[in-house]
């Protein structure tokens, strides 16, 4: 996410940080680069103009000239203004209402509205500890009701059945009555979408809104449509009192124009951001964290929260105890670590949140290839348990059997074994909690792309920096 913008901005900042002092001239040069980067990211022109004016006003003024590190001060200003255009803080859902609190979901067809209803239902259940019911008032799109029923079953929330022959108002009325009867905390109402904004759709959703009087009316929009997403949200907001926006498919958006434009154009906050297809791939939108990601500073808080949610703590504790007792780190343990990384969205998702990614050479982050991790897992799965616990017994015939069973090459297996050896050495240094030794072990690992490096593009590894 934001890969192109991060790359462009990082290059501009690198030029600035090398300067002893900043003048109006080199600040204006930097701002020209920033303006170009934002326009290429498909950020709406009024947003770009306002952003550049505000950064220029602060940078050319006293803030930078008095700073001991002018380049860093300039980056800090850009970060503050990025946060300002996206909203100062996460706008939480307002669920303070007599139960059930009703959330009305609106959006165009194809934006991922029904999928988002399922994701949001799961988030409310697991993160907010709410009893949730979902209902579909989309009586036009074939299989919309069945899709929501399937999603409700997957995430473990109540589903209120509806039929295509019913009027949306009747469906909504019956759903509210049933949600009250079952003492539900939240009722999520999925509405019909269209391929384009039309009067009939707007009239129908306005009627539903008046009838339900929801505490939240969320507009779901595809992030990959760029500034068009902001313009569509504005058109909806003019006809319907929106309380917030949910950006979907943000993991496939390398530009970021929608995230940077929506708040400024609609005046409504982005409340959630969809980062994948899985039911758990929905995150609250934190402008400060997103600004950090855009500037290549990472997002450690989100990384920690994700680890809390997705890492199997029992397995992690078991491995820690095993290492503390001096037992070896075998290939079964290595496979478990690979799975944990994949649970967190893969190495690309983790790298996106790691600090310092903006300092990597252009395009380096894009060289990460998660298929290497799946290949490594397939190799380990083709081994017997004895081979996993004691890989030293792997001779030529065993290696041939394993590679044939996993559809890989001998060099893939040898690379895996070298990487495992490196991990083993590092884990031995961790025995007894010697963190300093562990850090030295990390530093001593062969540079990514070398024999012990983590897998990357083209079967090698990350380039050595």
Image (cartoon, grey):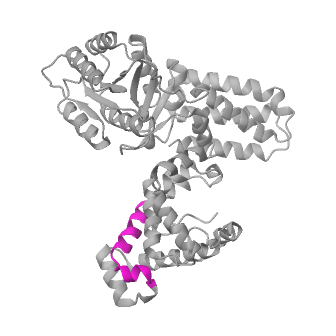
Q: Quadrant of residue 382?
A: bottom left
Horizontal side of residue 332 vs 358, given as left or right? left
Q: Whole-percent x and y of residue 183?
A: 32, 25
Q: Main secondary structure of the magenta part?
A: helix
Residue 13 visible here: yes
Q: Whole-percent x and y of residue 36?
A: 60, 34
Compared with 164, 23 (above or below) is below
Task: Compare residues 314 and 164 and report the one nearer the observer.
Answer: 314
Residue 380 magenta-drawn?
Answer: yes
Q: Whole-percent x and y of residue 448?
A: 58, 67
Compared with 375, 401 (above or below) is below
Compared with 240, 293 (above or below) is below
Residue 244 magenta-drawn?
Answer: no
Task: Compare residues 200 and 104 and report the one nearer the observer.
Answer: 104
Task: Identify the image quadrant of the C terminus.
Answer: bottom right
How many callouts does the rendering have? 0
Horizontal side of residue 435 vs 93, given as left or right? right
**Residue that appears at 53% across and 23% down:** 263
Task: Compare residues 275 and 186 and report the one nearer the observer.
Answer: 186
Horizontal side of residue 426 vs 122, given as left or right? right
**Residue that appears at 53% across and 35% down:** 41
Q: Whole-percent x and y of residue 184?
A: 33, 27
**Residue that appears at 50% across and 58% down:** 367
Residue 451 visible here: no
Horizontal side of residue 143 vs 132, given as left or right? left
Q: Quadrant of residue 389?
A: bottom left
- The range drawn in magenta is 369-391
Task: Compare residues 368 and 363 and report the one nearer the observer.
Answer: 368
**Residue that appears at 56% across and 34% down:** 286
């Amino acid at each position: 996410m934001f890969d192109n913008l991060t790359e462009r901005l990082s290059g501009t900042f690198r030029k600035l940080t090398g300067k002893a002092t900043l003048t109006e001239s080199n600040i204006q040069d930097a701002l020209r680069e920033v303006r170009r980067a934002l326009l290429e990211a498909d950020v709406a022109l009024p947003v770009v103009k306002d952003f550049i004016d505000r950064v220029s006003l602060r940078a050319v003024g006293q803030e930078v000239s008095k700073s001991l590190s002018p380049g860093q001060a300039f980056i800090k200003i850009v970060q503050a203004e990025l946060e300002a255009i996206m909203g100062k803080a996460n706008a939480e859902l307002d669920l303070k209402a007599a139960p059930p609190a009703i959330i009305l979901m609106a959006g165009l067809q194809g934006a991922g509205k029904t999928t988002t209803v399922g994701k949001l239902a799961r988030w409310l259940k697991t993160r907010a500890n709410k009893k949730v019911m979902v209902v579909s008032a989309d009586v036009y799109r074939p299989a919309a009701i069945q899709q929501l029923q399937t999603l409700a079953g997957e995430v473990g929330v109540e589903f209120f059945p509806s039929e295509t022959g019913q009027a949306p108002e009747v469906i909504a009325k019956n759903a509210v009555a049933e949600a009250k009867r079952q003492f539900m905390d939240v009722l999520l109402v999925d509405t019909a979408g269209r391929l384009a904004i039309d009067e009939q759709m707007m009239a129908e959703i306005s009627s539903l809104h008046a009838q339900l009087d929801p505490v939240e009316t969320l507009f779901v929009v595809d992030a990959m449509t760029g500034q068009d997403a902001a313009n569509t949200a504005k058109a909806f907001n003019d006809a319907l009192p929106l309380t917030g926006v949910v950006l979907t498919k943000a993991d496939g958006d390398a530009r970021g124009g929608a995230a940077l434009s929506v708040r400024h154009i609609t005046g409504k906050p982005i409340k959630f951001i969809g980062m994948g297809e899985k039911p758990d791939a929905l995150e609250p939108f934190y402008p400060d964290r997103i600004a950090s990601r855009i500037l290549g500073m990472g997002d450690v808080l989100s990384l920690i929260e994700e680890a809390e949610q997705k890492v199997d703590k029992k397995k992690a504790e078991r491995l820690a105890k095993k290492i503390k007792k001096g037992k070896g780190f075998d290939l079964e343990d290595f496979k478990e670590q690979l799975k944990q990384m994949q649970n967190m969205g893969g190495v690309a998702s983790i790298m996106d949140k790691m600090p310092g990614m903006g300092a990597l050479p252009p395009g380096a982050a894009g060289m990460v290839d998660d298929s290497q991790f799946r290949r490594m897992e397939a190799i380990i799965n083709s081994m017997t348990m004895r081979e996993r616990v004691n890989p030293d017994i792997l001779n030529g015939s065993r290696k041939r059997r394993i590679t044939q069973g996993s559809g890989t090459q001998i060099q893939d297996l040898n690379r895996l074994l070298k990487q495992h050896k490196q991990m083993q050495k590092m884990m031995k240094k961790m025995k007894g909690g010697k963190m300093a030794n562990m850090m030295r072990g990390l530093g001593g690992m062969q540079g990514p792309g070398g024999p012990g490096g983590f897998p990357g593009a083209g079967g090698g590894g990350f380039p050595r920096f």
